[in-house]
Amino acid sequence: MEELFNQIANFGFPMVLSIYLLVRLENKLEKLTDSINELSKNISKISNF
């Protein structure tokens, strides 16, 4: 039983932490992508004048 707890502590916690961080970063990466696309469109509009 103690070995099971050690395995959970060694592998479970890092997996949960990794998933949490990936979910948080995914939202920020989507916002960054949208901002870059909007910036690209605005630059294109400005350069056409």
Image (spheres, rainbow, N blue to C red):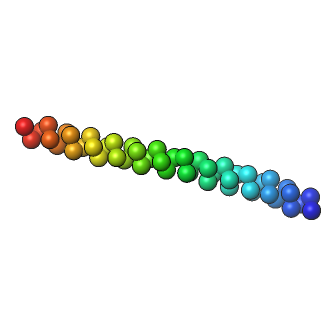
Q: Residue at x 54, y 46 (%)?
A: 24
Depth order, front residue of 47/20: 20
Is residue 14 found left or right of 26 in the rendered image?
right
- Report which quarter residue 41 is drawn in: top left
Count of residue discs:
0
Is residue 46 found left or right of 30 in the rendered image?
left
What quarter of the picture does the N terminus occupy? Answer: bottom right
Is residue 31 found left or right of 4 in the rendered image?
left
Given the current orientation, which residue lies at the most extreme right position?
1
What quarter of the picture does the C terminus occupy? Answer: top left
Q: Which residue is drawn at 39% across and 43% down?
A: 32
Percent position of residue 39, x then y: 26, 40
Is residue 1 found left or right of 10 in the rendered image?
right
Percent position of residue 3, x then y: 89, 60
Q: Residue at x 42, y 49 (%)?
A: 30
Q: Residue at x 80, y 53 (%)?
A: 9
Residue 7 vertical placement versus 40 (above, below): below
Given the current orientation, which residue lies at the most extreme left position?
49
